[in-house]
Image (spheres, grey):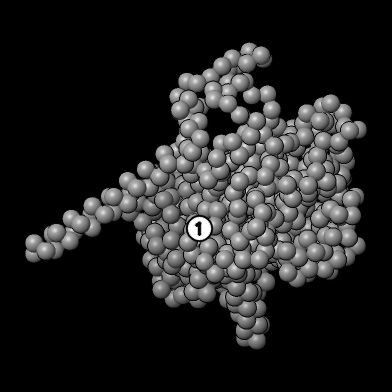
Amino acid sequence: MKLKNLLIAVLAISVLGSGLNGFSEVTAADRENCLMCHKYPNMARIGEDGLERNYYVDEHIFLNSLHGEVGCRECHPYIKKFPHDPVTEKVDCANECHIKPPFAEKNFSHREIIDVFKSSEHEKKAEDSPLMKQSKPDCKYCHLNPLYKRVDENIISFGETLDRCLNCHQKKGVAEAYLHMTHRLRHKTSRDSREIVSLCAENCHGDEQLMQKLGASAAAVEAVETYRESIHGKMTALGSEKAADCISCHASSLIHDIYDKDNPKSTINKDNLLTLCKNCHAKINPYFVRIAVHPSIKEPHNPVLFLISNMVLRTILYGTVFGLMGLLFLESYRRKKDGIGMKIKSGSSWRNTKGLK
Amino acid sequence: MTAAEEALNAVHGGQTDVEGYFTYVSGVGYIPRDIYKYVKSNPFGDLPRYSVHIVIQHILIFTTFIALAATGIALHYSDLFWAPYVIRLFGGIDTSQLIHRSAAFVMIGASVYHILTIVGSTAQKILKKEFDIRRTQVPLPKDLFDLIHDIKYFLGLTPHRPKMEKFMYKQKIHYLAILWGSFVLISAGTALLFPEHIALLWPFDPAFLQDLARIMHADEAIMALIIIAFWHLSNVHFVPGRFPAQWTVFTGKITREHQLEEHFLEYLRNLSEIPEEREYMRSLLAELGFAEREGSLDETRP
């Protein structure tokens, strides 16, 4: 009996100990001692624009994020002395950092994917208007270094996830490691489809006035609205991981290769639609891809459907509902007046009917 | 020709608006039009109305309808605040999609079952030479006259309701609406479920057909939901005399007073088919002082 109690105590202490160990890991990674200053939540200054900027780093959040392993000066290499001067440079995600990813010979860098991004529609170009330049996103607009959500492994295939890993990691070694062990060690995580839609929609593609000012086509101005009207949009809005979000169609597994639909490299180019839709719709044919993914029944696009939906069906609906309900109220009024009660009481629902006519 | 049939033919022979207050049935007596105010009724039903097949079909249809409407409406109004809660109630969007499709499958099965029942029993009646189109859901000119007559009654312009068959104008409107609605919902739903195949059916403009299916499916469903929730339910369960519920949905039987009030001609058929009912009506008439008085009353108002 005593032995059993002792065993339980040892087990409890070791469980507790491993928990504490998990917390103590957090403080170990600040190799450059930046937190000496940046650990203070009120560490801030008022910038030239008059806005207060806060320089606090919550180490617990940072160390649990994707970049938790990366030292501060890997991304902020311009900091050479301590305490440092005001920072004027922006972080360049194409930096090479002093971390070798698994199975790799070279130091890690986001260079390759940034090259893809630079060829895409979202890169700032010389001929762009100042508003356009201001509106185009940089890396950090989408990549906020968030804690991603868990996704159902059964929904997203291994191959699909692996394709994304290989955007940055080399295939040799990583593919095997991923297929054999990684998925058993930790759960697959990803950005939620809803988050992707709101990233694209908020501030830019969903802002119809801004899109008009930027000279977008009529279809592009309404793209978010029409997407939300579609079955993909509705499923995504309700939390589906299967339905297509923006980048499911507008980019390949490279994610960043978003082009205008007239560009032959674009996934949504006419010639590439069959391959694109086949990712989800197995029994595909050339007619299927002509179905509108951003459907609109507004008047200029689709006058026939607009008429059917807004005139014919509405009239039938209101006519039927109000006609039948009117008849119902009229009927109940008269029958009530004629002496009917609500319920059947002692065999009859008719009250006060003494003597036949 | 029996007495009941004679009375039926008199009504169908264009005399609906000049209605006789007394209806003579030989062996029973002169039945006044407002006899339904004096009969005894069992709330669970007295007279046969629906076969067990129809009861099963109705139960299948309304249970699947609730599941279909809840999952479908939440998807259609996905941008409204309550939609995610309804979807969560059904176990997430993927599960609710599966529920919607399974329920649709069961509902289509129930529809096929209904068609088989109707075709089978109609064929049986034709073979036995018992078929009478006036007893079916087929709309006839009399239904229009009945509607006009009933509106007159509602407005107080005439003292009594029309003498109607087993299915009155309301039921015929509703039945036709269900036929049309099922056709639209099933065909449009199929187009939404198998877009690849439907695109091949209309290769000239697959986008148009798909959008049409999308609009028609949603619109027809919303219309069905509004009509069922506001009109059908109150008509059947909440109006005076039917409250708190009519049990016909489970028992397949109708109360005597309801049959006499809204389906008087069907009641006359009940009299010739059910001897107990004939006996009941004869003794009730004697009790009320309407015992058979040969020649004292004719078919017109006294």
Q: Position of residue B179 (x, y in %)?
A: 68, 63
Q: Residue visible at 76% across and 65% down?
A: A278
Residue B89 x/y as whole percent: 48, 52
The residue lying at 62 percent from left, 33 percent from top is A76
CA neighbours of label 1 inside 10 A, class few (<14), some (14 to 19), many (20+): few
Q: Nearer the viewer, residue B272 or A195?
A: A195
Residue B278 in the figure: left or right of residue B235: left
Rendered image quadrant of residue A288: bottom right
In the rendering, at what x and y percent does residue A105 appear? 65, 57
Which of the pair B16/A14 is nearer the observer?
Answer: A14
- Residue at image position (82%, 64%) is A274
User: Looking at numbered disc 1 in the image, what kind of residue is underneath it?
Assistant: His
**Relative to the observer, which residue lies in front, A103 or A193?**
A103
User: Mark 1 belongs to which subunit?
Assistant: A
Residue at screen point 62% across, 81% down? B120
Viewer can see residue B8: no
The quarter of the image holding the N terminus of chain A is bottom left
In the picture of the structure, the residue carrying the numbered disc 1 is: A187
Within the image, what quadrant is residue A55 found in?
Answer: top right
Q: Looking at this view, name the residue that lies furthest to the front.
A: A81
Q: In terms of secondary structure, where does tag 1 sit?
A: loop
